[in-house]
Image (tube, rainbow, N blue to C red):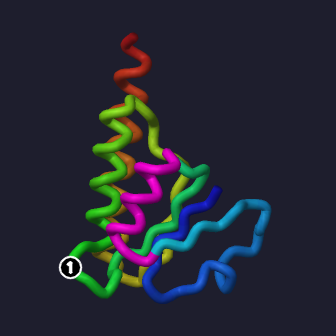
């Protein structure tokens, strides 16, 4: 499954490889509900600005916390946001958790 987080962009306009079941969520609450109910998808595509108080960065923080609680690595991800600062923030938290997970995995 591919989880597409974006309040505006239709995933079918951006995803060429349609071998995935695409689930389109448009806000923080839908994103969190999907993860809680279904676990991690294969890929997550993030937008930052979701037209509400909570952003894609908040979703990335939720995801890192979820992965920490379940002792899971993050799934493959991409960021389609045009907000450069927001994009960098999402990438930073995702890669930070990935590095932490790998370091702790190797120590066991």
| Residue range corresponding to the magenta coloring | 26-39
Residue in front for this viewpoint, 81 or 2 = 2
Residue picked out by circle 1: 53
Residue in front for this viewpoint, 101 or 33 = 33
- Secondary structure mostly seen in magenta is helix
In this view, the residue farthest toward the top is 108
Query: Left or right: where does residue 14 sit relative to residue 91?
Result: right
Q: Does residue 96 lie above or below 1 as drawn?
A: above
Instruction: Kindly indicate the quadrant of the structure image that contains residue 17.
Output: bottom right
Query: Left or right: where does residue 108 sit relative to residue 75?
Result: left
> Magenta stretch: residue 101 in it?
no
Q: Position of residue 82 (x, y in %)?
A: 42, 83
Q: Position of residue 44 (x, y in %)?
A: 52, 60
Q: Position of residue 89 (x, y in %)?
A: 29, 64
Query: Left or right: where does residue 57 sit relative to residue 20?
Result: left
Q: Position of residue 24 (x, y in %)?
A: 55, 73
State the residue at coordinates (42%, 75%): 47
Local SS, label 1 = loop
State the residue at coordinates (46%, 44%): 74
Q: Does residue 72 lie above or below 74 as drawn?
A: above
Q: How many marks?
A: 1
């Amino acid at each position: 499954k591919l989880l597409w987080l974006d309040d505006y962009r239709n995933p079918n306009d951006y995803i060429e490889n349609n071998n995935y079941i695409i689930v389109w969520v448009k806000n923080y609450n839908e994103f969190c509900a999907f993860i809680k109910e279904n676990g991690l998808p294969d890929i997550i595509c993030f937008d930052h600005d979701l037209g509400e108080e909570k952003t894609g960065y908040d979703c990335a923080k939720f995801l890192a916390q979820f992965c920490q609680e379940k002792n899971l690595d993050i799934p493959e991800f991409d960021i389609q946001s045009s907000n450069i600062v927001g994009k960098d923030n999402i990438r930073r938290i995702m890669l930070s958790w990935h590095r932490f997970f790998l370091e702790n995995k190797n120590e066991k």
